[in-house]
Each structure stands twice: as structure tokens, then as C-alpha cells.
Image (cartoon, grey):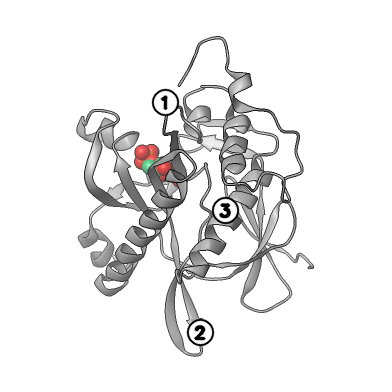
Amino acid sequence: MKKGKKLYEGKAKILYTATEKGTAIQHFKDDATAFNNQKKSVIEGKGILNNRISEHILSNLNQIGIETHLIKRINMREQLVKLVEIIPIEFVVRNIATGSLTKRLGIEDGTVLEKPLLEFCFKNDDLHDPLVAREHICAFGWSDDSELDSISKICFRINDFMQGMFKSVGIKLVDFKVEFGRLNQNGKKKIILADEISPDTCRLWDSSNDKKLDKDRFRKDLGNVIEAYQEVARRLNILHEGTNIKTVEFGKLRSVKNRK
Ligand code: TMP
């Protein structure tokens, strides 16, 4: 698979043109950022794990009829994906209150929500991806009611599927963020999931002790970031397929304080 010119470089991924029209190569970097780029680091091996975890989840979604941009994983750091027109909205689904929701509304951290909550954020780094209402999205033409209705349904289906998948390996799916794109296929417009799904974009807590197994370990300086990502891959039983990095047992690397 030949990589062409760089189309776009984001905080954790780079998109290159690919030989076949309508496709692109998505490269997963080891870079980690938080708080809109204010905190930065390189976490060795993170891109490899996210590539593999995201491939696993997206191919499962494809199999249950939720169409995604994933065509196939090409190597340890890259996937071949369908090129889409990205809808500039981040869709956040929450099952347990934490993160910005608790800060914004004073809800107690860890509150289990009666039903999943879907939030919309306008994808704009300069404005720090602000929370917006459906009315803003329609008023400014970022999407419309019909697209938002179908995307909302897809978000809840993804949530149902992922909650089950993670529950079966002892992990609580606390929340996640996904993005969607428009695809023109034989003159017909389709909406597909066009994003990674990984511990960078989900909050995952160990079911037995609520220990964080996601990017919050980096955001909150909890340590053992890569070990947590490896633990997620290990539980999903995909650690040794194409994730050729040194592995360490998460439990053995607990740091000085017994952090969650
Ligand atoms: P939040 O509580 O900070 O709003 O995050 C909600 C979810 O969205 C959480 O799983 C982390 C994910 N997320 C991203 O993937 N990218 C982002 O830029 C932000 C702010 C959150």
C-alpha cells in the first residue's frame, strides 16, 4: 500500500492520500495531548495499541451493520479508510458522569446516569470544542435534523454494543466521543462513523475497582498510561496480534500511591 501526500495532521493521527480514489491512510502517532494541546507528551507504543484496538472495535461495528470508515488495518500504525466529508461535531455519549459534565453542571463524579446522555460539541480547537445545542448545529448549517436523528440512533447503538463488549471483559464504558462523515456512494449520501475508538477517546474503568484504563491516566498524571492501554488490549484478547511492543502486566506496575 503506497502512502501519498499528507492531507491533514491532527493531534494524534495523520491522514495521507492512498492509491485508490476515495480512500486514505490513517497513521496513529504516539503523541498525546490534553486540554486542547496545553499538555503534551509522547507515549511510546500508544499509536500501535490505538490502531489495533480501534480496528477491533470498528470491524465489530461493521459486522453488526454500523458502517464505519475502516477498510482494513495495513500495518502496526496504519489503516486504510474511506475518505469522507467530516461533520464538524463531536458526539459524546455518557453512561456515568465524570470529566467536563461534572465540572460544568456540578454533578457528582461517578453518578450512574439513568439512561445514556448524548452531547454535541462544535469541533473547533480555537473555541475549545464548545458544547452546543441541536439548534446551533441546524442554525449554522453544520448538520440538519435528519442527519442528527440518524447519528443519534447510531451513537446509542454503538454505546449498547460497546457497553456489552467491555462489560464481558470486566470494564465499564463510562463515556466516549465519536465523529461522523458524509460519504457519496452511487449518488446516494450515507453517514458513516469516521473516527478512532480507543482509550484516547473513551473513558474505561475497571469494573472491580473503578481503576482508570484510559487517557485520563495521562490527563490527570496518574502514571502507567501505556500499561493501561495494554490492559484494555489484553482483555479484548488482541494484544499479540500486530501489537509488537514490550508488554508489562498492569497490576505489577502500580506506582507508589495506590492510585485508581
Ligand atoms: P469530557 O468529559 O472531557 O467532555 O470528555 C468526554 C469524552 O470524550 C471522554 O471519553 C473523552 C472524549 N474526548 C475526546 O475524545 N476528545 C476530546 O477532545 C475531549 C475533550 C474528550
Q: Residues within 10 Å of mark 1 (few under 14, many from 20)?
A: few
Give the secondary structure at mark 2.
strand
**What label does residue 54 carry, if any?**
3
Which residue is nearer to you in this view: 9 or 249? 249
Identify residue for label 2. 185
Measured in 3D between alpha carbons, the distance from the residue under mark 3 to the one under mark 1, in whole angstroms, is 25 Å
Identify residue for label 1. 209
Mark nearer the N terminus (3 vs 1): 3
Residue found at the very far right of the displayed protein: 2
Mark nearer the N terminus (2 vs 1): 2
Measured in 3D between alpha carbons, the distance from the residue under mark 2 to the one under mark 3, in whole angstroms, is 24 Å
Position of 43 with respect to 91 (left or right) is right
Measured in 3D between alpha carbons, the distance from the residue under mark 2 to the one under mark 1, in whole angstroms, is 46 Å
Residue located 40% across and 53% down the image = 123
Which residue is nearer to you in this view: 219 or 257? 257
Residue 59 falls in image quadrant = bottom right
Q: Are marks 3 and 1 in contact (CB under 8 Å)?
A: no
Amino acid, disc 3: Ser
| Image depth: mark 2 or mark 1 in front | 1
Residue 175 lies, in percent from the top left, at 37, 44
Give the secondary structure at mark 1.
loop
Which residue is nearer to you in this view: 209 or 214? 209
